[in-house]
Image (cartoon, grey):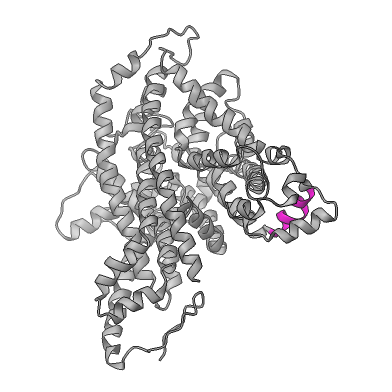
Amino acid sequence: MEAERAGRGRRRWSRYPSRTFYLFVSPWVLGFALLTALPLGYALLVSFTNFNGRNSRWRWVGLRNYTELVRDADVIASLVRTLAYTAITVPLMVAGGLGLAVLLNRRLKAVGLFRTIFFLPSVVPVVAMAIMWKLIFNRDAGILNAILEKVSVGPTAWLVDPNAFYALIILTLWGLGGGMVIMLAALQGVPAELEEAAVVDGASRWHVFRHVTVPMISPVIFFQVVTGIIASFQIVIQPLLLAESNQVGSVALVPQSTHLYMVQVYEEFFNNNRYGYGSAMLWVFFVVILAITLVVLRSSRLWVHYQVDSEGER
Amino acid sequence: MTIVRDPARPAIKPASPAPARRPRRTADAVGTYLLLMALAVLFAGPFAWLVLAALKTKTEWVAIPAKILPENPQWGNFTQALTEINFAAYLGNSLFLSFLYAVLVTFSSAAVGFGFARLRGRGKRPLFMVLLSTMMLPQILTLIPTYVLFARIGLVNTYWPWVLWGLAASPYLVFLFRQFFAAIPAELEDAAIIDGCGYGRIFLQIFLPLSRPVLVTSFLLSFTWIWGDYIAPALFLDPDHTTLSVAISAFYRDPHGNPDTMLQAAAATLYVVPVLVIFLFAQRYFIRGVLSSGVKG
């Protein structure tokens, strides 16, 4: 917004009508209308029908899909699992990312090397990630069971119920390097004078971290929590690919414990051909995401304020 | 004192820490290093295990007790992985789609980012708010209905969806470009306008060349998105036209229909190494991308 504010009232704006602006942003506006709004609207329409994907004779069923899904035991169970997955992974991801960032924010040799190693997993394509972790979790030949055997733990089947849930969490946590980089940048934005002042006042390192550093980067932490929640709600590929010997687009082999909400949606669409019902599930999900997004946008004022403050000090 | 200065922030460090605190600092550093090395093993381990698996024979892989290192590295697994399925064709599809999308989306996002950064129009603020909120929208939410729609109009099993997604710009990259363009001094633009230059030429001949680092970031990020994407090719493309990601996850089978683990590991190594190499050589571009996703708002 800075540029806009700076340019307000200048003559050059008035010489160029809104037309130029619309011309430049039209790719996104058209794309948003046709590839985001239209599919979402279409899904809303379909959610009130019994469309099965093939038959063009749809029947309007009103709110029946919605009333069914709030009573559908499978949907409720998948939602509860998704909430559990979110409640476990998001705090661990955020705390882990912050912890690594704190470790790497010190003046150590080879800090860049460690940063690279921790960040690397977050750029690995999901298919390769799943293959790698299936090799580790393999019951007979995987290295995890080989290590566990050394401490006399018998072979564990990691990729079936109930352990598949924990395997999925471990796979997710492996990618926390992306969050680490963001936290690191946030930590480096904390003015050193503040922390030094606290040290001079006799605060311990933990107190400085808890009462100076964390409040200073709290907008970033909050943002990480919110994007983390949204990211973990939409998990679908990882359970599909972690399932033993999956076929493309088949959810039949996904273990119960990793049968999350989006996996359920996927199953309704592509296994049960219940496009109407699946669309209703998507819309429930959309409304939840929308609510979370609104919270973020409301809190963005907090973040912008923070940025202006720290820039003023520099 | 031998404190290494952070070049990014040459903060004034007047009172150097008392010498008495030094031994504690050394012990601290040793502890930190041990912790970092243990963590590094955890984070790098899966890569090593993948490559080791790719170099084993089937008997070595299932041997009990498990063998860490292969006796004779089976480099043949890699050549076999290339011939077992039509690897070259899937690689070609992956490269083509990734390149096509990356070029289109980088250009369209730069244009939209320029619009939001330097031009004015009615409704700009609400439009920008919508753009920011769509960054939060999970891709899967629109992907499934898009698939249903595209199936009805015959766009499934063509590469047109990627062209359309590319032309439509990515909100995330738009934001990246907008931040960059907004920071360029207005004088540059004013001088061009005085010389009679239109905004089309200002964008193409002044702003676009200036934004080279962002162009590289955008291209690399969007390239790796499509290279790594699984769900869109799995939904939109049939097995003959699909990408390497789908082929690797599903097409390596022994005659009994079970996954051919060694060949799959070899293929996955070949699939992931280019990403890691690009990343290592262009780390700062990736980090720039990650940062802009974390500090928006």
Against A14, residue A284 (above or below) is: above
Determine the residue positioned at 65% across, 37% down. Answer: A27
Q: Nearer the viewer, residue B253 or B282?
A: B282
Q: Is residue A239 left or right of residue A112?
A: left
Q: Is residue B80 magenta?
A: no
Is residue B202 magenta-colored?
yes
Who is closer to the viewer here, B229 or A35?
A: A35
Q: Which residues are magenta?
A: B201-210
Residue A75 appears left or right of B130: left
Residue B65 visible: no
Q: Residue furthest right?
A: B195
> Does B43 sit above or below residue B22?
above
Q: Quadrant of residue A210?
A: bottom left
Specify the principal SS of the magenta part: helix
- Above/below status of B253 relative to A143: above
| Residue beneath the point at 62% across and 29% down | B158
Locate residue A50: give its quadrant. Answer: top left
Question: Which of B136 and A249 lies nearest the eye of the viewer?
Answer: B136
The quadrant where residue A66 appears:
top left
Q: Residue furthest left?
A: A152
Whole-percent x, y for residue A8 in the image: 65, 51
The x and y percentages for residue A274 are 39, 17
Please state, as top left, top right, bottom left or bottom right, where the N terminus of chain B lies in the image: bottom left
Q: Position of residue A68 (x, y in %)?
A: 29, 17
Of residues B281 and A188, the one drawn nearer to the viewer in this rendering: A188
Task: Determine if residue A166 is in view.
Answer: yes
